[in-house]
Image (cartoon, coloured by chain):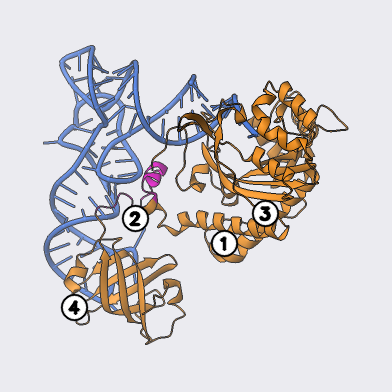
Chain colours: A orange, B blue
Amino acid sequence: MERTYLAKVQGAAVNSEINVCGWIQELRALKNIVFIVLRDNTGTVQVTLKPENISNINEVRELERESVICVTGVIPEKTKSTSNREIVASSLVILNRAEKPLPLGITDPVSADFETRLNNRFLDLRKRENALVFRIESSMLWGMRRFFHSKNFVEIHTPKIVAAATEGGADLFGVRYFEKEAYLNQSPQLYKEIMMSAGLDRVFEVGPAFRAEQHNTVRHLNEFTSVDIEMSFADHHDAMHMLENAIRAGIEGTLEELGPEIASSGIRMEIPEVPFPRISYRECIAFLKTRGVDVTFGEDFSPEQLREIGSQYSGFYFITGWPSSLRAFYTMPSAEDPEISNSFDLQYNEKEITSGAQRVHDPELLTKRFLSKGLNPDDFDFYIRAFRYGMPPHAGFGLGLERLVMILCNLQNIREATLFPRDRTRIVP
RNA sequence: GCCCCGAUAGUGUAGUGGCCUAUCAUACAGGCCUGUCGAGCCUGUGACACGGGUCCAAAUCCCGUUCGGGGCGCCA
């Protein structure tokens, strides 16, 4: 018999036989009757077992919480259960028993440290509200993928193992690659740009990025998921336009799929209005000065300064026109104002989630930019070559998926939005 | 990497030098009761991160280590 998801039990026909499978969330063995609250991926339902119907009832009485079972039974017309429906079992199959005690209770009225939760993530995610974060991430990503696909983007996959000289080096993880030295890539940047020269026109990639920085904060991971796009014959305005509409599409799709559950979980998620406000770096400096914050042109904003800015500009907004000195070598300087670049960050309140820009497409300028950043252009020959034989103007961005989910779910720690976070000290599980 | 804070049963906690053979809840085990549903009642098992030191006496004070939390820095 085909398995029925527990969420479908409410709407299933009474008196017909059904088969349900899941975990024993609670078991109450009374003298003449046994009740099980069964849980699966979709919900819970009470299963009622009467000794006269169940041959292995004594074995069932001894089952541990979180053991895995399948039950066949019927839904009676009337139930004495305070839940709307129950299943009166005709048979119960024990598929796998759980050890006890549980290292983390699923329904216990005691909280658990986040570390305990991470060490037992498989149990932690049996809680629906914890798993919801990852359902939201999935829906969000599907929404953005559909959007990019509709805009003629090609989804690509670039190497995560790269040669020593590719990226300057200091904050990369080294790996042994047979007889060579190699590194884990910190961004698909160079490769997605090469695809512009290849004529793919518009590309996006969803993949891991690795940073060997010894940061220890609630918003940094050493391995995170980057949603990257690059588009030809485009500038930073086009990239910002694409980004805000991708986010809007992602949230629309997420609310379509998970709206009721998101609402009942207490997460406030709304479809943002586009376009997002654009605030220039220079405007931010001027604003901070009106608030008595001492800040000079050419400095990155500190967390405290970003909180100040975020108290003025809430929700999604762009900070545009960052000083060229703060941006990577491939960032296009502004034609009108040589001190700044055609770049942007997408912020949500005080949090940065995306960094993007129009890119340099002229190989001579690119070489100068390398030199001004103290990098040796020879180390990037595989990259610059793609610029010498017809590279179109292009622009793009990289978005931190976990940071986006963190914002959408109003989480205080980015690790909450990561199944198995990799931070300064954690590599297990 | 720097600064601050922390580590007590499976889980979450109380306890700041002797009153601690360490509190409470939950979980677990046994019993009573019961179409239960945060089930109820009774009984029981179970812990001071590790290594040094101070002291008549250390969960408690000091040093180190490990791990964790927060902040900063770093951060294509």
Magenta stretch secondary structure, dominant: loop
- Labelled disc at residue A55: 4
Q: Position of residue A385 (x, y in %)?
A: 71, 34
Q: Chain of mark 3?
A: A
- The residue labelled by disc 1 is A263
Asked if the stretch drawn in magenta spans residue A174, the answer is no
Q: Whole-Å distance between the Cαs marked 2 and 3?
A: 47 Å
Give yes or no for contact between labels 4 and 2 (Cβ–Cβ under 8 Å). no
Q: Chain of mark 1?
A: A
**Hey, which quadrant is residue A79 in on the image?**
bottom left
Which contiguous range is marked in magenta?
A100-121
Q: Type of residue at label 1?
A: Ala
Q: Position of residue A67 (x, y in %)?
A: 28, 62
Q: Whole-Å distance between the Cαs marked 1 and 4?
A: 43 Å
Give yes or no for contact between labels 1 and 3 (Cβ–Cβ under 8 Å). no
Q: Whole-Å distance between the Cαs marked 4 and 2?
A: 30 Å
Mark 1 residue element: helix
Give A221 or A76, whichever is nearer the viewer.
A221
- Mark 4 residue crowding within 10 angstroms, few (<14) / some (14–19) / many (20+): few
Q: Whole-Å distance between the Cαs marked 3 and 4?
A: 58 Å
